[in-house]
Image (cartoon, helix red, strand yellow):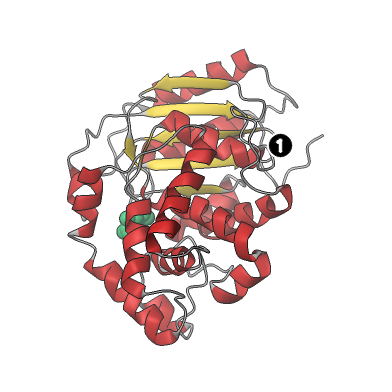
């Protein structure tokens, strides 16, 4: 395994280009289809961006294509809420454990007295959205959009098309919100929380944005492009820990075992991987595997991090 302590930009670019070339032709997986919008996104799109903690960015392939943020939004709403209520209250009210079950599991709630366990599954993310400290649902939504934009370093926008596609098909999530309500593990009106969670999933980002969002975490909570502090440095490890616990759906344990880095994926085909103190990899490719993770995105993130010798369980200088 190659282990340069501070790899040159050219070295990382060569590795990212090799990853793109190697995996672009991988035919495996299929677009998510339970949200109609996602089914019609071209499956051959493939972008890889690497953002360093100093703001340097490498881009290969379709890094400017705007895709729905989906589950990646859960990380940034979590960051907002940890800032507002603290990591211990977040753990008590939502949790910091793997569910071992699919991201939209009702069974997981039934097994744990209605406690979601993770802010990165749907139940936990809806509960977390309800914990955004605001005057009303619109104020909470404004804060969710604002924190996503701060992580990206540019104003993100809600896609009305994605939101319409989600809001007209999200009956399962609404059911989850009512189960949370009956268990007293949601902290605002359940339908309002589900609505702002769904809107939070319906903004558009690029692979480049995603890399910068991850690099903000890699950089201790300061966006390396805007130099704005988005999260306190002390809160970043809790966010990364939640990603390590439940970032790749039911494959989270396998990912940590084989790649050893905190990541988060989405049903739209995005995946962000964070190397604390160094860089973040943002990849996008719509076809998903059985667990719901981008096939090419995982291959690229694993290849790049392994070529660079990055793994949080491996000692580095
Ligand atoms: N909006 C999607 C849902 O709630 C996000 C799922 C995901 O990306 O994991 O089902």
- x, y (%) of residue 174? 28, 71
In percent of the image, x 45 and y 70: which residue is there?
127
Q: Count of labels shown?
A: 1
- x, y (%) of residue 88? 67, 70
Mark 1 residue element = loop
Q: Is mark 1 within 8 Å of ligand 1?
A: no
Q: Is residue 237 above or below residue 174?
A: above
Q: Residue furthest right?
A: 317
In percent of the image, x 45 and y 84: which residue is there?
184
In percent of the image, x 47 and y 73: which residue is there?
116
- x, y (%) of residue 24? 35, 26
> Which quarter of the figure is the N terminus placed in?
top right
Q: Quadrant of residue 173?
A: bottom left
Q: Quadrant of residue 114?
A: bottom left
| Residue linked to disc 1 | 277
> Which quarter of the figure is the C terminus placed in?
top right
Does the image show residue 49?
yes
Q: Nearer the viewer, residue 75 or 243?
A: 75
Q: Nearer the viewer, residue 134 or 238?
A: 134
Graded by Cα atoms within 10 Å as few (under 14), some (14 to 19) or many (20 or more), the crowding at tag 1 reads some
Q: Nearer the viewer, residue 41 or 28?
A: 41
Q: Residue furthest front?
A: 135
Question: Where ligand 1 lies, by quadrant?
Answer: bottom left
Does the image show residue 275?
no
Q: Is residue 232 above or below residue 130?
A: above
- x, y (%) of residue 4? 72, 24
Q: Is 176 displayed left or right of 265 in the figure?
A: left
Q: Is residue 198 above or below residue 124?
A: above
Q: Is 255 displayed left or right of 250 in the figure?
A: right
């Amino acid at each position: 395994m190659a282990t340069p302590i501070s790899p040159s930009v050219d070295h990382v670019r060569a590795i990212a280009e090799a990853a793109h070339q190697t995996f672009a032709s991988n035919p495996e997986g299929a677009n998510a289809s339970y949200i109609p919008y996602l089914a019609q996104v071209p499956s051959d799109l493939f972008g890889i961006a690497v953002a360093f903690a100093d703001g340097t960015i490498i881009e290969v392939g379709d890094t400017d294509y705007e895709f729905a943020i989906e589950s990646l939004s859960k990380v940034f709403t979590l960051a907002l809420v940890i800032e507002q209520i603290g990591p211990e209250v977040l753990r008590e009210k939502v949790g910091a454990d793997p569910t071992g079950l699919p991201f939209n599991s009702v069974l997981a709630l039934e097994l744990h007295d209605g406690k979601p366990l993770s802010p990165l599954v749907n139940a936990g993310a809806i509960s977390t959205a309800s914990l955004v400290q605001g005057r009303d649902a619109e104020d909470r939504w404004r804060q969710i959009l604002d924190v996503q934009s701060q992580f990206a370093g540019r104003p993100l926008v809600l896609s009305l098309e994605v939101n319409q596609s989600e809001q007209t098909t999200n009956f399962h999530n609404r059911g989850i919100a009512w189960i949370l309500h009956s268990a007293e593990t949601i902290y605002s009106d359940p339908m309002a929380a589900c609505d702002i969670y769904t809107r939070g999933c319906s903004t558009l980002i690029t692979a480049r944005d995603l890399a910068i969002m991850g690099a903000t975490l890699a950089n201790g909570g300061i966006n390396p492009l805007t130099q704005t502090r988005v999260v306190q440095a002390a809160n970043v490890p809790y966010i990364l820990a939640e990603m390590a616990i439940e970032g790749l759906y039911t494959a989270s344990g396998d990912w940590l075992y084989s790649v050893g880095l905190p990541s988060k994926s989405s049903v739209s085909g995005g995946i962000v991987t964070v190397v604390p103190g160094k860089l973040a990899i943002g990849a996008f490719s719509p076809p998903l595997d059985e667990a719901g993770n981008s096939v090419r995105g995982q291959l690229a993130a694993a290849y790049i991090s392994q070529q660079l010798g990055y793994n949080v369980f491996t000692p580095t200088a």
